Amino acid sequence: MSRILTIEEQQALVQRGCTAESWERIRVADDFRVEQLQNVRLMGEVSIGSNTTITFSTVGNYHIGDNCHIDSVLRMECRHSSTFGNGVMVSAVNENGGRSIPIYNTLTSQTAYIMTMMRNRKAVVEEMMAKVAREVEQQRSNIGTIGDRVTILGVKFIREVNIGDDTTIEGASHIENGTIMGNSRLGVDVRAKDFILDNNAIVDSGACIERCFVGECSHLGNGFTAADSLFFANCHCENGEAAAIFAGPFTVSHHKSSLLIAGIFSFFNAGSGTNQSNHLFKSGAVHQAVHQRGSKFGSNAYVMSPAIEGPYTVILGRHSRHHDTQDMPYSYLIEEDGHSILIPAIALTSYGTVRDTEKWQARDKRHLKHDNIHFDEFNPFITGKMLRGVDILTRFWDEDPEAKSFTYNRTTIKATMLQRGIKLYNSAIAASLGVMLKGGDHTKATAEAQGEWVDIAGQYMPSATLERLLSLAEDKSSTLADIHNLLNSAMAEYRDMAAGYAYHILGAIMGKSPSKNDIEESIAASHNIIRRMRESTDADRQRDTGTTMMIGYGYDFRDEKEREADFFATR
């Protein structure tokens, strides 16, 4: 409940240095005390919640919740009708705007992916944007809102920004036209314009963002700058720069010299000096790159767009020949004498790959989980790519078994690496089938499970399910809630659908419908294969933690045991 101020309260507030354009437009909680305000200038319509204090600040056209503390804010105002960042167009992936989408409060990595990456489905994208436009208009208001338990200290300007519960804004410079969903933090010298922050997001330490969506539990800081970019769940970017990117879940960049531009990333790690080019000077900055799930760049790695790498690819060196290695997951792409050398499947033997797949789920800090994310190491999407990879490599070998090397989509594969890649892929495929069969009930899977699968910005699903999703999105009678419900249903059905996929592939390999005994043998075989794979990756780990890596440890001591003690204590 709220009420207007009494004449006595108005007079007491004036004595405390407060002014109002119209005291009649100021409303307060029933238990309001004049001690809650000091040296405050109130403009337009303002409501103040229970136990909320405002000091040395200017506030105009805001509804403020309970138990808030606002101090030393030069100006916090809503000057005109606003949708508070909802509807702002973000030119992700294509810097010239060819894939621009509107951001809005309930945007997820999946709905963003559909609008951004599926421009071949024009009617779908247009209808999705129409649905978003209707939701955006529901946010329009002349009055800004601040939730409960919000702290705002030492901020210069806040204009047309809705602020959710339990948010802290301290020392920010300029925040304009945005929404902060709640439990979030904006820190010293932050500048943010035309933005939306999902729950538990952090933007601090001089970060500057413009036309950006920052997802749940994401963190941008230490002078990081970003424009026209989408950051989804658990991204962590500091020091560097992003321009026109789609940063899917767990995109990480920590180094000052790193640039992420005009691309789509997911479960990505940028090494120091990471760089990309999207401007070939002929047609402008229209090019893009796709770095699929789990890719990582080594220090000073460079890729010239357009280009695409398969999942869990490690990129080392400079690559300017527009490679396409999407059907070669778990590979290394290295530079050798100016050429791009592809080593298929070699990352399957790396402990780093195992560590990556384990750490992401452990680092998932979300509570609301707006983005749908699968963490499974063995899944239909990557299994399908490995199957295609084996077909490609086997065809190369069959066509010319005497060749020293093979050319694949503007990369070079050496013959010895090709043979090893086939063996590694076949082992990983067998492991995947057993794990998926054990993880779900294939009898509950629909026919959709049998075809190709896709990775929609963190969520695995059959292509047939995606087609059903796109048909729903194109339906003018459907809503964004209907789309989210279908996505969530696909998440709930994933285990059984993955088992159905594995059952179908196993049957294709065997040339018959697998029996119960065949399934049990596949599961048992997968255990043995995974054990051998882990022995290989553990050996790789031992090389990294072995005593040959002890250089520089315990360097103040000549005794070997003292050096070892320091080494193992810190490792």
Image (tube, grey):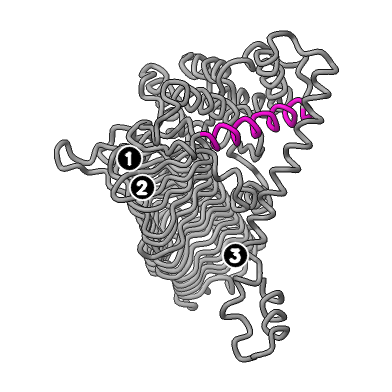
Q: Which mark lies nearer to you, 1 or 3?
A: 1
Q: How much space separates mark 2 and mark 3, taking CA atoms?
A: 31 Å
Along the viewing direction, whichever of 116 and 35 lies nearer the viewer: 116
Sequence-wise first label, 2 or 3: 3
> What residue type is disc 2 on?
Arg
Q: Which residue is mark 3?
A: 52
Residues shaded magenta: 419-439
User: Looking at the figure, which quarter contains the C terminus?
Assistant: bottom right
Give residue 563's position: percent from left, percent from top: 67, 83
Q: Is residue 148 above or below residue 567?
A: above
Do the numbered discs 2 and 3 sit on residues whose CB atoms are within 8 Å?
Answer: no
Question: Does residue 469 appear left or right of residue 134 in this picture?
Answer: right
Magenta span contains residue 427: yes
> What residue type is disc 3 on?
Thr
Do we see residue 353 in this rendering?
A: yes
Do the numbered discs 2 and 1 sit on residues whose CB atoms are within 8 Å?
Answer: yes
Judged from the image, the secondary structure of the residue bearing numbered disc 3 is: loop
Do we see residue 18 in this rendering?
A: no
Q: Which residue is mark 2?
A: 211
